[in-house]
Image (cartoon, rainbow, N blue to C red):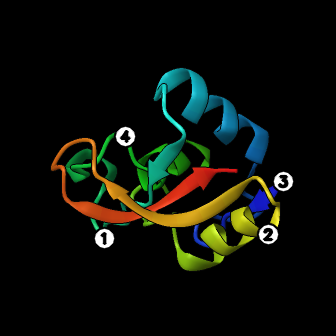
Amino acid sequence: MIDLPHGGRGNIFDEQELVKHVREELRSNYIVQGQQNVSLAEHTKPHSLDYWLRQFAECPDTKQAVNSVCDALVATGLFKTADKPDPVTGRRVKALCLV
């Protein structure tokens, strides 16, 4: 389980659910980080980690894909970081890739 430090008290998520989301919902081997300091309604990266994590947060209008969360995901051994194309813009951005 991974802690969301900006999600609200006691907000956590299961990293295996993220693996499942990336494989089954995104049909990919990576998810872009997609950090945005906007409300959920204004978020422009619906296929990003930041957007996905907000479903677990008491505070969904706060950025959730912070570096400590990404570091914790890499520490599980399930992910590594890389630059990958954003599925919306095509620009290369920070992403978490399945190992």
- Rendered location of residue 32, percent (x, y): 41, 54
**Marks 2, 4: nearer the viewer:** 2
- Rendered location of residue 99, percent (x, y): 70, 50
Comes first in the chain, label 3 or label 2: 3
In the rendered view, tell whether residue 98 sits above or below residue 81. Answer: above
The answer to the question of whether label 3 and label 1 lie on touching residues, with beta carbons closer than 8 A, is no
* Residue that appears at 27% across and 42% down: 87
Crowdedness near tag 4: few (<14), some (14–19) or many (≥20) residues, C-alpha within 10 Å: some
Comes first in the chain, label 1 or label 2: 1
The answer to the question of whether label 4 and label 3 lie on touching residues, with beta carbons closer than 8 A, is no
In the rendered view, tell whether residue 79 sits above or below residue 87. Answer: below
Tell me the distance, in whole angstroms, between the alpha carbons under discs 4 and 3. 21 Å
Q: Which residue is mark 4?
A: 47
Looking at the image, the residue that sits furthest to the left is 89
Q: Secondary structure at mark 1?
A: loop
**Marks 4, 1: nearer the viewer:** 4
Q: Is residue 33 visible?
A: yes
Q: Amino acid at mark 2?
A: Ala
Crowdedness near tag 1: few (<14), some (14–19) or many (≥20) residues, C-alpha within 10 Å: few
The answer to the question of whether label 4 and label 1 lie on touching residues, with beta carbons closer than 8 A, is no
In the rendered view, tell whether residue 12 sits above or below residue 80. Answer: above
* Residue that appears at 56% across and 67% down: 81
Would you say 54 lies left or right of 16 here? left
Tell me the distance, in whole angstroms, between the alpha carbons under discs 4 and 1. 16 Å
